[in-house]
Image (cartoon, rainbow, N blue to C red):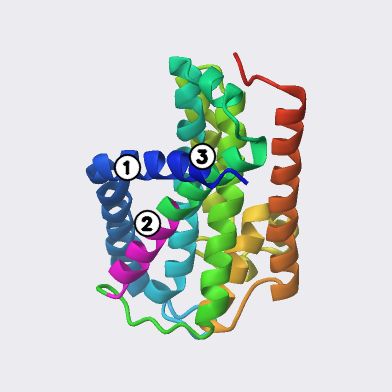
Amino acid sequence: MNIYGIKAIFFFEMARFFRTAAQSLLAPVISTALYFVVFGTAIGSRITDVDGVSYGAFIVPGLIMLTVMTQSASNASFGIYLPKFVGTIYELLSAPINFFEIVIGYVGAATVKSLIIGVIILATSYLFVDLQIAHPLAMFAFLILTCLSFSLLGFIIGIWASNFEQLQLIPLLVLTPLGFLGGTFYSITMLPPVWQTITLFNPVVYLVSGFRWSFFGTSDVSIGVSLFAICAFTAICLGIVWWIFKTGYRLRS
């Protein structure tokens, strides 16, 4: 394995992340703080406890998931799209480094970036609510798996996109709505039975539910189903990335 190649890609991406710290770190944290103020304080004061948990604390796992999903996809997609845009993708493809090592470099960096943002948001939440984590190891496992899987999705988006508009299309028009409709701010048991059934087709439901279980010990769907869903999603993304490098799909365009 070309460790030097992986390190070169990884540290280049991390350096770009810290060069734009105001955009990369402060923007998602400020946005999340505003969510806490509006939903946790203003609206939460009018909503009773959800499954025995105060509403302000209840929305914390959903907010973290919503942020790391969009940030993972955005960071990874831009990371691989930039070499395509400026033309350095040819140097990357001709270098003595295989597709798996390229994926480790770009996806690994995007995963670490999102983990940093997720941990900062978690720490910020303690300023607004009294939060207890029932299963800390499971919480970090779900957080890492979510960051990894959506970084892989972002990598696929970055290769598929042919312009900056397409680069933002899926994160803005698909991931964000799915996040809001996936139980970020509510329990799906609060919905009518018909909508509960429809909501189960939203994959984000399983991520949010499993992550929320790690905090409070309660979930809308089985923890085993949630874990299977995120592992299956990760495996599908890995398969698509392998197919892209095998066929050369849009790598040079």
> Which numbered dot is residue 233?
none
Q: Earlier in the sequence, mark 2 or mark 1?
A: 1
Sequence-wise, which precedes: disc 2 or disc 3? 3
* Crowd band around label 1 with a 10 angstrom C-alpha radius: few (<14), some (14–19), many (20+): few
Q: Is residue 73 above or below residue 166?
A: below
137 in relation to 77, above or below: below
Closer to viewer: mark 2 or mark 1:
1
Spatial separation of the CA atoms under disc 1 and disc 3 = 15 Å
Question: Residue at horizontal 64%, vertical 70%?
Answer: 189
Please name the amino acid that badge 1 sits on.
Ala
Q: Quadrant of the C terminus?
A: top right
Left or right: 199 as drawn, with respect to 165: right
Magenta stretch: residue 117 in it?
A: yes
- C-beta proximity under 8 Å, tags 1 and 3: no
Residue under pointer 1? 15
State the residue at coordinates (48%, 30%).
168
Percent coordinates x, y for residue 194 in the rendering: 74, 58
Where residue 147 sits: x, y (%)?
Answer: 53, 55
Given residues 104 and 51, the one toward you in this image is 104
Q: Is residue 115 left or right of residue 41?
A: right
Find out whether residue 46 is within the magenta segment: no
Question: Where does residue 178 sit, x and y in percent of width and height?
Answer: 58, 47
Near-viewer residue (81 or 165):
81
- Which residue corresponds to mark 3? 5
Residue annotated with mark 2: 117
Magenta part of the chain: 114-126
Q: Quadrant of residue 99?
A: top right
